[in-house]
Amino acid sequence: MPPARGFLDRTEILGVIVLAMVIFVILPAFTDPFRLNLYGKYLTYAFVAVGLVLCWGSGGILSLGQGIFFGLGGYCMAMFLKLEASTPEATAIQSTPGIPDFMDWNQITALPWWWEPFHSFSFTLFAVVAVPVAFAFIIGMAMFRRRVGGVYFSIITQAVAAILTILIIGQQGFTGGINGITDLRTLLGWDIRTDSAKEILYFVNGILLFVCLGIAQFIRRSKAGRLLIAMRDREDRVRFSGYDVAAFKIFIFCVGAGFAAIGGAMFTLQVGFMSPSFVGIVPSIEMVIFCAVGGRYSILGAVWGALLVNWAKSAFSESFPELWQFGLGGLFIAVVLLFPEGLAGLWNRYAAPLPGRLRRRAPRSAPAPAE
Amino acid sequence: MFADYSWGELGSIFAMQGFAGLILFSVFVLMALGLAIIFGQMGVINMAHGEFMILGAYVTYLMSGLFQTWLPGLFGIYFFVAMALAFVAAGALGMVVEWLLIRRLYHRPLDTLLATWGLSLILQQLYRSIFGAREVGVSVPQWMMGSLPLTDMIELPINGIFVMVLTLVIAGGVYVMLYRSQWGLQVRAVMANRSMADATGINTGWTDRLTFGIGCGVAGVAGAAFTMIGSTSPTAGQLYIVDTFLVVVFGGAASLLGTIASAFAISQTQSFLEFFLSGSMAKVLTLLAVVGILMLRPQGLFSPKIRK
């Protein structure tokens, strides 16, 4: 990696411009509203993948439970939307009007106390990020202070994801169970099911993603970012130098959780429902794959990974569902064995040096760039 | 919550739940033994472990059909043939996987996790393409059906007892292999210090392959045993994987005794909670307790004392 001078170096600026062009110009111009909504959905996974690049690529901590935070953010948003859709007039046919329909089906007659604050939009916006980050803080405190790391951290986060999924499915009356929270209609009176609303949400999603990319880049360029990389490579040395290793890990884990939560909330808004199938072990591991395919050290690569893997998944699973399973499995193995730094690694190795080589016209004598 | 039951009833409940817990314990031990070798000894995170078990289950399914059609006279003992074949099939697949995939990743444990997850997806789809997406069950031989009445309230199913006996035999076998045989000594030497073991003339590459193969083979036998108490589907392996890892990690990864002790603790907790709470809440509480204790003792219950 070249030494960091400014906020972005030349290839990174080029990368940001290309990505911005694709997200804000090319995709909206050439796709119909249905497809655009689909790409918006993929981009919500990019939030998770960028958070994973920070945790895994920079910090060396692989969380297999990012679905927890994606889901918590998504559920917070879904609870607000569900309460807005469950006015006493709209739910007049229920035995208890004014509560969400799935509660009525489960013979619950009053809104649980922890649903009450979600009547307020400003509280919801706060909770979307605060609840998952607080959760991540607790997990991080408990684990990193006790020096649980590496593989053990991954397995425990996976278990936490399993626990949360079982809890959501089991507490059907409070969470909508396996179906999740469905039939969401309006956001502050604005119908989110129309094409124009979906298009606006797509652009909001894109802008938020670039804000998160900016924050991620800022963290990577800061002293904390460099310490994280040092910790990933030789944790004990950083500890012996007097730094509080656990605090940095907790911090980056919380940032990753916050990004995932924003992605989850935008997912709920664009797709119109939230369910436990985005929380558990399998979706959490798929999120790691988006990050690994894009490149675990590159935040822009993570966005590409999320877009391309999901695009391939839709394209193949529509026509050849069997092939897709084989393809996805093969992709995992190929990424690990053949290009561990993902698409970004391939780009940096083969495509990025190309202009310089062409200019020099002496590819064989070109000196290798200093690492 | 105890007030509604008489003492006699409570005694039977505890006996029955305890026995159900013992069957669950056998299941956990069978699942975890192979992983204790692969993860505990080799440090490889094998997310496809469940799929190796399912392979054993499908081998048993095929054998049951084969014996029913061609050798109905020997149907009573088909299960033992199936178990041996399950060991060979899963073990052979394990050795191929080690040769193609795992041996390139020994220094990158988190990457073995991703690669074997990919492998598990491929195997699942393979099973689905060959055997169909439906659950399949095997025909249990006559002598394994029915139950053993102890008192008029307590009955013990024979297939449960059989699985428990099988667990004892396999656990004993693994113990002897790891701690009382030349091969076990070599495995532990390679895991402790690879380059030193290499220098003393141990063929480390072959030891790795054999170790991984035997770990997978034990998983295959576990899968064969599961067909006696439940049905098999292409995705069933994924249901076990988190539990299995927690059992191994909770016990202290490198300790066989720890694996068995943690399987016992987890299964009994879950079985008793299940009677008084719903199944899902029992599961949640058990997992929470395991995660909580792991945070207090990150190295597991029985961890070798080493300075870190």
Image (spheres, coloured by chain):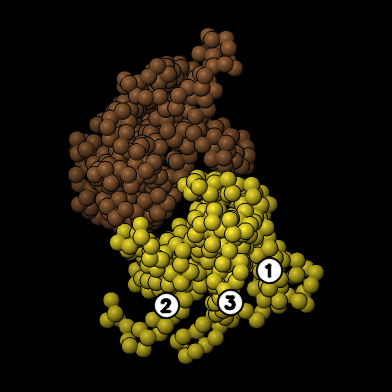
Chain colours: A brown, B yellow
User: Mark 1 near mark 3, Cβ–Cβ under 8 Å?
Assistant: no
User: Which label's residue is closer to the chain start, 1 or 3?
Assistant: 1
User: Which label's residue is closer to the chain start, 1 or 2?
Assistant: 2
**Chain assignment, label 3:** B
Q: Are marks 1 and 2 on the same chain?
A: yes
**Chain assignment, label 2:** B
Q: Are marks 2 and 3 on the same chain?
A: yes
User: Which label's residue is closer to the chain start, 2 or 3?
Assistant: 2
x, y percent for residue B308: 35, 57
Residue kind at label 2, given as amino acid type = Gln
Residue holding disc 2: B17
Task: In the displayed orientation, state which residue is furthest to the right.
Answer: B70
- Between the residue at mark 2 and the residue at mark 3, the CA separation in whole angstroms equals 23 Å
Residue holding disc 3: B169
- Between the residue at mark 1 and the residue at mark 2, the CA separation in whole angstroms equals 31 Å
Query: Residue, x 42% and y 18% (percent of image)?
Result: A11
Front-lying residue, B218 or B276: B218
- Between the residue at mark 1 and the residue at mark 3, the CA separation in whole angstroms equals 14 Å
x, y percent for residue B202: 61, 59
x, y percent for residue A192: 34, 30
Does residue B200 appear left or right of residue A104 in this picture?
A: right
Front-lying residue, A216 or A8: A8
Quadrant containing the N terminus of chain B is bottom left
Query: Residue, x 62% and y 58% (percent of image)?
Result: B201
| Element type where label 1 sits in the image | helix
Residue holding disc 1: B84
